[in-house]
């Protein structure tokens, strides 16, 4: 961790990342660590600091559902990137009770109260990570953010409630806020173990020699975006915050990929690395907690965000899948080697 104490360093803007140790948070950290800023990384568990960082980096840990901890975390910030989210660790990750409500909505409510500027203060820029699925079951497969929101899951309803808290605070002049709605994110972050999401879960199954399963015939489409391109979108958003303020923006690759074809590709990529035959891709009965959104295709038109910021994804789907398989294969191989070494030592 580096600390800037000279006058020049103190003039650098302070970017605070809430949820910096998470999947997207780790990628956002790596992106901003390359910039000449003061970077404050805040999360429940300690966030990793990139070794090649240019930024002056400060790491803090704490429970950000507590008012005092949250206020301390964002004190003096010029930009706050809100990546906090509560998702159940159960099979039905959408489970959203009071604990989830406290994180997903309560944190935003407290944040916008804490950040109210004084008489001569300049509003802090707050960038919130929403989700494309907040729109619900849209009438068309392709969405651009102009659709009415009718979220279907508790999680999506909470994400929308937090977005509306931010929009209300922005209209009141308390903050300069806006939301980036993210698609299905794939990939791994260097220096952080594992990944998240359905694609990573199916890669894990294939690496273990288990069949890849899906709850439909494979024709359901998802817009898949690598986490590095997501991080670059947040960087572009900081650069163009004054043009983005006050609304939500859709982030995506612009293509909806049939999941059956994606999983077939995953099976072949894993086979090439393990030397085993590709695992089967099977349709299985959906669980009781499956929702209509699980069977609803989506692709994202992010032309509005691109028009303002110039952002474009750099990685193709194939490149993103290959990187994700490589990283998870490397991680699994390392874990197996360590386990074998431990057994020998014992």
Image (cartoon, rainbow, N blue to C red):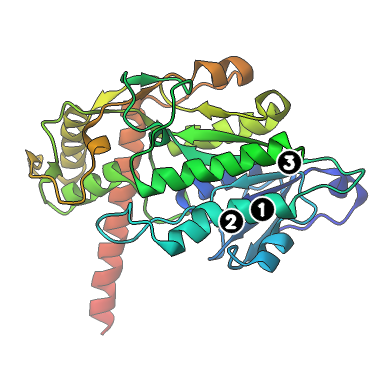
x then y, percent, for residue 7: 92, 49
Question: Is residue 278 visible to us here?
Answer: yes
Tell me the residue that label 2 is attached to. Answer: 107
Taking the image as shown, residue 300 lies to the left or right of residue 66, namely left
| SS at mark 1 in the image | helix
Counting residues from the start of the chain, the first of labels 1 and 3 encountered is 1
Compared to residue 3, the image places residue 304 above or below, namely: above
Looking at the image, which is closer to me, 215 or 232?
215
In which quarter of the view is residue 252 placed? top left
Are the residues tagged 1 and 3 within 8 Å (C-beta)?
no
Q: How far apart are the two marked residues, 2 and 3, measured between alpha carbons?
A: 15 Å
Looking at the image, which is closer to me, 255 or 86?
86
In which quarter of the view is residue 296 placed? top left
x then y, percent, for residue 95: 33, 56
Q: How far apart are the two marked residues, 2 and 1, measured between alpha carbons?
A: 6 Å
Tell me the residue that label 1 is attached to. Answer: 111
């Amino acid at each position: 961790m580096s600390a800037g104490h000279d006058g020049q360093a103190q003039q650098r803007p302070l970017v605070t990342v809430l949820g910096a140790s998470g999947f997207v948070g780790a990628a956002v950290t790596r992106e901003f660590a390359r910039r000449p800023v003061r970077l404050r990384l805040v999360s429940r568990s300690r966030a990793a600091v990139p070794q090649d960082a240019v930024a002056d980096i400060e790491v803090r840990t704490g429970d950000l559902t507590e008012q005092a901890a949250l206020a301390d975390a964002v004190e003096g910030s010029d930009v706050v990137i809100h990546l906090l989210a509560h998702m159940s660790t159960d099979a039905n990750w959408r489970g959203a009770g009071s604990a989830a409500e406290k994180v997903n909505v309560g944190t935003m409510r407290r944040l916008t109260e804490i950040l109210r500027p004084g008489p001569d203060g300049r509003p802090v820029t707050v960038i919130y990570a929403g989700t494309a699925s907040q729109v619900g079951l849209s009438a068309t497969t392709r969405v651009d953010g102009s659709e009415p929101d009718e979220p279907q899951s508790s999680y999506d309803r909470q994400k929308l409630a937090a977005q509306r808290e931010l929009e209300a605070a922005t209209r009141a002049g308390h903050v300069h806020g806006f939301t980036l709605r993210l698609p299905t994110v794939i990939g791994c972050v260097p220096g952080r173990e594992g990944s998240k999401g359905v694609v990573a879960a199916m890669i894990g199954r294939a690496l273990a020699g288990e069949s890849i399963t899906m709850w439909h015939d494979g024709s359901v489409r998802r817009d898949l975006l690598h986490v590095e391109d997501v991080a670059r979108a947040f960087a572009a958003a900081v650069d163009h915050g004054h043009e983005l303020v006050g609304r939500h923006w859709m982030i995506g690759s612009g293509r909806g990929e049939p999941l059956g074809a994606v999983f077939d590709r995953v099976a072949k990529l894993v086979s090439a690395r393990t030397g085993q035959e590709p695992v089967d891709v099977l349709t299985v009965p959906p669980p009781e907690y499956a929702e209509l959104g699980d069977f609803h295709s989506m692709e994202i038109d992010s032309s509005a965000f691109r028009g303002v910021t110039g952002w474009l994804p750099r990685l193709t789907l194939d490149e993103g899948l290959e990187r994700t398989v490589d990283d998870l294969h490397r991680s699994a191989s390392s874990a197996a080697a360590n386990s074998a070494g431990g057994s020998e030592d014992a």
